[in-house]
Image (tube, rainbow, N blue to C red):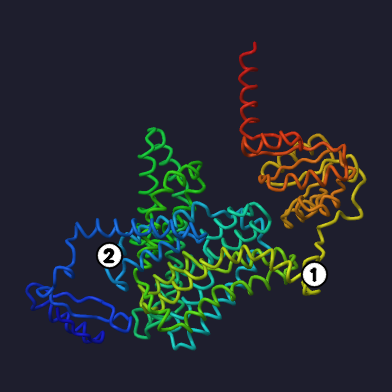
C-alpha cells in the first residue's frame, strides 16, 4: 500500500482529478502520521490489503455500533468502579476504537451520523428537565453569578487562544467550552451526596440552568457568524454583522413562537391521542419521532441547529401532563444514543496531544477547574453567602462536560477549530470530570483547614445573614406556642396555607434566602437557614414552640432536628414527612415523632372518600 502525504490544497486537487479519471475510484482520507497529527492521504483502493480495506456498508454499521457499545460498556463500568463518572469511560472508548490508536477502527462517518441523533435526544432530555422555577427561586445569585463566572472563564479562553494565534472564533469557542459545567455530572454528584434538595444544591442547579441558556444561545449564533469569526473570506464575511445576527435571531424567534403558540397546543393533544391507544411502544415512538422530527424540521425550514430544535421541543413538551412519562419512556434510548455521541467525540481525540502539547493541556485544564472554581467562589462570597455555600458551588462548577463537547464539535464542523484544539478541550473534559469527585470529597477537610488557619475565613463562615433572625418587631404569638415549620416547598406551602386558614401562628425555617425574603414581605414570620443547625431552630424560638413540623423531602437531617428540639423543649410534638416505607419504619421504631408516609396518606384519603361514597 502506497501513501503520499500532501498538504490540504494539494490533496483537494489530487482528489478532484482522481474522482474524474480513476477506475475504480480512488479514495482520499485522513490518517494519523508519525507525529500523531492528522494529515490528508491518498490511498489507491486496488492496493488495499485485506486488513486495511474498508468494511462493506452493512457490516460497517453493525461493527461500529457493536464496538462502540461493547467498549463503552466495559470502560464505563470500570470508570464507575473507581468512582469516576461513566462519561469518562465513553470518551476513552471512542479513543480506543478511533483512528488514533492501533487495532480495530470504527467507521467515523457512521459514528458521526449516530452522534447527531445522540445530540438531538440529549438536548431533548435537557429541555424536558429545564425548570424555570429552579432558576427563579435562586435568581439573585444564579443569574449574576453564572454570567460573571462564564464571562471570566470565556475571557481567559480568549486570552489563551490569542496567545496561541487562534482565530477569534476558535478562541471564543475555547472560552465558552471551558465555562460550561456538566449538568449530568453535577446532578449525579449532588444526588449521591444527598445535596440535591439543599439550598447549595438548588443554587448550583439554577446556576447551570443559566449556563445552559447561554450555551444554547451560542449554538444559535455561531453558525451564521462563522465567516466573521473565522475565515475572512467565509460565506458571510461580506455581509454586515447586524444583518447576519438579525436574520438568525428572526428565524430562531419565529421557530420558538411557532413552538410555544402552536406546538404547546398540538403536542399535548397528539400525545393524548397516542396515550389513549394504551400502547407503550407507540407512545415511546411518538415522543422520539416528535423530538427528532422537530429538530430536523427546525433545521430544514428555520436554519436552526438540531440541538436547539430538540431543546425547544423538550421545553414545550415539559408543559404537557405527559412530560414525566415522556422522560421515563425515552430514557433508555436517550442514554444509548448519548453514549454513541460521547464515543464518536472520543474518536476524534488525538491522545498524542498529552505528549506533544503538555503545557497547553495543563493550561486548559487549569482554566476549566481552577478558573471556574475561583470565579464562582469569589462571586458567591461577594454576594454575601457563607464560605460553606461558596465552596460547595465552586467545586460543583469545577468541571466541564456535554455542552463543552457539543460546542467543540460545532467548532470543528464550522472550521473554527482544528482537531488538535478539539483534543485539548476533550482532554480538559476527561481530566476535570475525573478529578471532580475527589474535589467534592475534599470540601469539608478543606473548609476545616481554612477555618483553622484564617481569621478572614472564619468571618466569612460566620457572616451575618439579614434573614437569619426574626426581627425585633415580631409579634409575641410567633414566639411561644407556635408551630415551627421546616421547609417551604410544595408540601410545606400547603401546610402553611392550612394553618393560615385556621389562624394558627407559625414560623417558617427555609434554606432559600429569597423565599424567606418573600415571606417577610408578605408579613409572615420566617428565618433563613438549615433546620439541622441548632442556632437556626433557636432563632425560630423552638424552645417555646408547641410543635415542630418537618416538611423537607430528605430524611438525612431528621435526627439532628429532633435532637435539638427535644433538648431545648422536651415536651414538643414532632411531625415528620417520609418518602419511603423503609424510612417510615426506621423513624417510627426510633420514636422520633409522628411519621407521615406520602403514599400511605394518599391511600387513606382515597379510601376515606370511597367509604363516604358508599356509606349511605
Q: Percent from the top left, x then y, of residue 84? A: 50, 61
Q: Which mark is residue 469?
A: none
Q: Is residue 114 above or below residue 377?
A: above
* Residue appearing at x 75%, y 44% in the figure: 559
Is residue 182 shown left or right of residue 51? right
Element marked by disc 2: loop
Q: Percent from the top left, x then y, of residue 468? A: 82, 57
Q: Percent from the top left, x then y, of residue 507? A: 82, 46
The quarter of the rendered structure image containing the C terminus is top right
The quarter of the rendered structure image containing the N terminus is bottom left
Q: Residues within 10 Å of mark 2 (few under 14, many from 20)?
A: many
Q: Which mark is residue 458?
A: 1
Q: Residue 366 or 528: which is nearer the viewer? A: 366
Is residue 98 shown left or right of residue 360? left
Element marked by disc 1: helix
Asked which quadrant contains residue 543, the reply is top right
Asked which quadrant contains residue 272, the reply is top left
Q: Residue 255 or 146: which is nearer the viewer? A: 146
Provide the residue designation for mark 2: 106
Is residue 326 shown left or right of residue 105? right
* Residue appearing at x 78%, y 53% in the figure: 533
* Count of picture labels: 2
Q: Is residue 328 above or below residue 113?
A: above
Amino acid at each position: 500500500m502506497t501513501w503520499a502525504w500532501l498538504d490540504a490544497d494539494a490533496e483537494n486537487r489530487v482528489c478532484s482529478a482522481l474522482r474524474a479519471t480513476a477506475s475504480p475510484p480512488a479514495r482520499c482520507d485522513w490518517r494519523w502520521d508519525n507525529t500523531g497529527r492528522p494529515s490528508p492521504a491518498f490511498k489507491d483502493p486496488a492496493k488495499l490489503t485485506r486488513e486495511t480495506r474498508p468494511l462493506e456498508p452493512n457490516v460497517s454499521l453493525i461493527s461500529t455500533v457493536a464496538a462502540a457499545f461493547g467498549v463503552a460498556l466495559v470502560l464505563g463500568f470500570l470508570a464507575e468502579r473507581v468512582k469516576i463518572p461513566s462519561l469518562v469511560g465513553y470518551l476513552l472508548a471512542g479513543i480506543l476504537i478511533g483512528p488514533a490508536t492501533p487495532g480495530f477502527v470504527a467507521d467515523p462517518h457512521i459514528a458521526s451520523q449516530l452522534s447527531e441523533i445522540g445530540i438531538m435526544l440529549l438536548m431533548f432530555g435537557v429541555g424536558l428537565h429545564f425548570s424555570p422555577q429552579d432558576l427563579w427561586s435562586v435568581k439573585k445569585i444564579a443569574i449574576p453569578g453564572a454570567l460573571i463566572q462564564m464571562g471570566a472563564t470565556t475571557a481567559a479562553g480568549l486570552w489563551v487562544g490569542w496567545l496561541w494565534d487562534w482565530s477569534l472564533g476558535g478562541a471564543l469557542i475555547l472560552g465558552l467550552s471551558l465555562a460550561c459545567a456538566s449538568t449530568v455530572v453535577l446532578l449525579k454528584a449532588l444526588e449521591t451526596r444527598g445535596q440535591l434538595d439543599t439550598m447549595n444544591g438548588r443554587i448550583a442547579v439554577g446556576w447551570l440552568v443559566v449556563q445552559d441558556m447561554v450555551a444554547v444561545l451560542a449554538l444559535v449564533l455561531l453558525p451564521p457568524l462563522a465567516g466573521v469569526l473565522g475565515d475572512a473570506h467565509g460565506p458571510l464575511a461580506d455581509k454586515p454583522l447586524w444583518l447576519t445576527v438579525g436574520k438568525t435571531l428572526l428565524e430562531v424567534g419565529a421557530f420558538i413562537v411557532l413552538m410555544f403558540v402552536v406546538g404547546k397546543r398540538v403536542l399535548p393533544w397528539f400525545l393524548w391521542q397516542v396515550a389513549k391507544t394504551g400502547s407503550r411502544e407507540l407512545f415511546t415512538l411518538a415522543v422520539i419521532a416528535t423530538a427528532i422530527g422537530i429538530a430536523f424540521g427546525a433545521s430544514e425550514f428555520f436554519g436552526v441547529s438540531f440541538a436547539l430544535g430538540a431543546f425547544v421541543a423538550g421545553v414545550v413538551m415539559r408543559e404537557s401532563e405527559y412530560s414525566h412519562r415522556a422522560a421515563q419512556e425515552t430514557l433508555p434510548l436517550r442514554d444509548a444514543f448519548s453514549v454513541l455521541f460521547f464515543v464518536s467525540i472520543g474518536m476524534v481525540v488525538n491522545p498524542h496531544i498529552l505528549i506533544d502539547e503538555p503545557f497547553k493541556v495543563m493550561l486548559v485544564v487549569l482554566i476549566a477547574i481552577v478558573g471556574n472554581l475561583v470565579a464562582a467562589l469569589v462571586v458567591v462570597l461577594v454576594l454575601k453567602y457563607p464560605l460553606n455555600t461558596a465552596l460547595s458551588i465552586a467545586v460543583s462548577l469545577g468541571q466541564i462536560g456535554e455542552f463543552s463537547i457539543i460546542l467543540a464539535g460545532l467548532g470543528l464542523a464550522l472550521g473554527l477549530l482544528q482537531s488538535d484544539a478539539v483534543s485539548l478541550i476533550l482532554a480538559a473534559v476527561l481530566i476535570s470530570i475525573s478529578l471532580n469527585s475527589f474535589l467534592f470529597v475534599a470540601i469539608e477537610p478543606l473548609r476545616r483547614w481554612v477555618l483553622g488557619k484564617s481569621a478572614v475565613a472564619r468571618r466569612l463562615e460566620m457572616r451575618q445573614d439579614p434573614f437569619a433572625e426574626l426581627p425585633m418587631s415580631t409579634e409575641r404569638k410567633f414566639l411561644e406556642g407556635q408551630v415551627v415549620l421546616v421547609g417551604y416547598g410544595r408540601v410545606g406551602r400547603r401546610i402553611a396555607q392550612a394553618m393560615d386558614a385556621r389562624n394558627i401562628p407559625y414560623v417558617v425555617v427555609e434554606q432559600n434566602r429569597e423565599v424567606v425574603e418573600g415571606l417577610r414581605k408578605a408579613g409572615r414570620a420566617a428565618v433563613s437557614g438549615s433546620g439541622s443547625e441548632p442556632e437556626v431552630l433557636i432563632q425560630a424560638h423552638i424552645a417555646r414552640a408547641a410543635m415542630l413540623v418537618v416538611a423537607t423531602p430528605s430524611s438525612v437531617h431528621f435526627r439532628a432536628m429532633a435532637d435539638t428540639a427535644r433538648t431545648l423543649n422536651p415536651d414538643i410534638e414532632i411531625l415528620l414527612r417520609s418518602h419511603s416505607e423503609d424510612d417510615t419504619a426506621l423513624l417510627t421504631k426510633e420514636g422520633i415523632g409522628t411519621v407521615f408516609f406520602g403514599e400511605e396518606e394518599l391511600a387513606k384519603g382515597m379510601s376515606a372518600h370511597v367509604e363516604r361514597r358508599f356509606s349511605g
